[in-house]
Image (cartoon, rainbow, N blue to C red):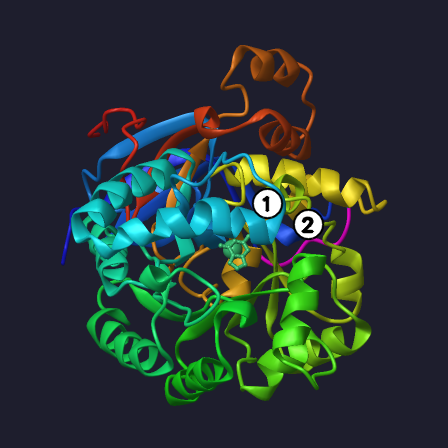
Amino acid sequence: ATSPARLLRGRIVSFLRRPHGADDDGALVHHADGGLLIENGLITAMGPFAEVAAAAPAATPVTDHRPHLLMAGFIDPHLHFPQAQVIASWADQLLDWLNDHTFPAEQKFADLAHGQRIATAFYDALIAHGTTTAVAYCSSHPNSVRAYFGEAEARGMRMLGGKTMMDRNAPPALCDTAQSAYDDSKALMAEWHGRGRALYVITPRFAITSTPAQLEVAGALLAEHPDCHLQTHINENHNEITYTLDLYPGHADYLAVYQRYGLLGRKTLLGHCIHMNDRELGVMREAGSVAVFCPTSNLFLGSGLFDKARLEGHGVRTAIATDIGGGTSYSLLRTLDEGYKVLQLQRQRLHPYETFYWATRGNAESLSLEDRIGTLDAGTEADIIVLNPAATPEMALRHETARSLADELFILQTLGDDRAVVETYVAGVGMKGGGNIPIIF
Ligand code: GUN
Ligand code: ZN
């Protein structure tokens, strides 16, 4: 599809690579008066506004977002679409929370109309919070995947997700079988993977809710479709780990179970990774699999503290995510703030360049999608957010004393939420309605 060119003007921040420590200015591009040329859903030029405008087609409309920041849309690499009504449920830790709140809510997604109603609200929330790509668990029902990708397609969003595979230790209304999980996953993959911007993710929930036969099927799906991602959970909670090792006797540790069934590769996303032993970290490094940190969830469910320095010291790739509905906010800004605090408790103090890199380019790299999303580089998809570091009165008051870009980013992270997201562009189209009216020169 072709659409008319447009120019965005604002303060551009985009990461070139992972920043190393404080004030590593070489890790990012910062144009105080920057321009982005958007054509057919892609960014086709990024640079100083005067240069980009001079090279743009004649009469290209300009949307002037100054003095706000233009940044790549946030990427949320772990959350649960059918838990939009589970968020904020008063519960004990993981296994009770699953049984008392999560499994009942997910059963409703057998109904396509229910899934579609929740999908509308779910995507509204993502857009409001500046999240332009997410990787979600749907429920075990194929209808939930149709609702999830159908709404993403209507909005033109690059979304990843899949049917949760689970065939034991859950209510019958949520359980599939090894065979039906294989058949349904295959059919959904054929229907959705690579259709528009959708990417299918093979999704065994975790070892507790899959029989050995079903984990074998998950491994077979990954072997047959190495272009698909795979997502699951690991080492989140001590009771979960004990139960897993009871169900899978004879394995050295939790990761050995996933290893045995061939679930580990560079496109494997492992949620939580809190209680990992050194052997597991070595295996993860070898496989290139990604540890996904979910700070608001880990605190809410009392799961524990993700040890970023230890994991990265072992060469393990990491990402940061909300984990809605164990997580408590759709906002990557709130998530970075809580992640910062989890790491502060362990004397690991992240610089704001590192946190904003993580939520954009870093998460894109963890999905092996940095050539398409996560930056404002020419040739990538035009998923762009507009951030106002003085969005609320208390932010504006603090912003009066900001002295650097790093200061402004840290204010956004510490005090910001959806109110700081002025506009969210998906494939070049403003979806939040915060953009100024384009000016035609
Ligand atoms: N482990 C298995 N399922 C889930 C889930 O839905 N949320 C979280 N946080 N952990 C899980
Ligand atoms: Zn999760």
Residue at horizontal 30 percent and vertical 28 percent from the top: 435
Q: Does the residue labelled 1 lie within 8 Å of ligand 1?
A: yes
Q: Is mark 2 within 8 Å of ligand 1?
A: yes
Residue 196: percent from the left, percent from the top?
Answer: 22, 64
How far across and how far down the image is residue 50, in percent? 40, 38
Labels 2, 1: front one: 2
Q: Does the magenta stretch include residue 370?
A: no
Quarter of the image with the N terminus is bottom left
Q: Is residue 32 above or below residue 229?
A: above
Q: Do the residues labelled 2 and 1 touch (CB within 8 Å)?
A: yes
The image shows residue 273 at horizontal and vertical percentages of 67, 62
Residue at figure coordinates x 31%, y 43% from the top left: 123
Quadrant of the rendering where the C terminus is positioned: top left
Query: What residue do we see at 57% from left, 14% from top?
Result: 396
User: Which of the 4 image quarters holds residue 140?
Assistant: bottom left
Taking depth in this image into account, of 34 and 165 the one nearest to the observer is 165
Q: Where is residue 248 in the image (x, y as percent from the top left)?
A: 63, 80
User: Is disc 1 placed on a helix, strand or loop?
Assistant: helix
Mark 2 neighbour class, 10 Å CA radius: few under 14, some 14 to 19, many 20 or more: some
Range covered by the magenta-colored residues: 16-21
- The answer, for residue 155, to whether it is visible in the render is no
Left or right? Give the position of 206 relative to 85: right
- Which residue sits at x=30%, y=46%? 426
Q: Write down the residue under mark 1.
A: 297
Q: How far apart are marks 2 and 1 (CA)?
A: 8 Å
Look at mark 2 in the image and give the residue it sits on: 303
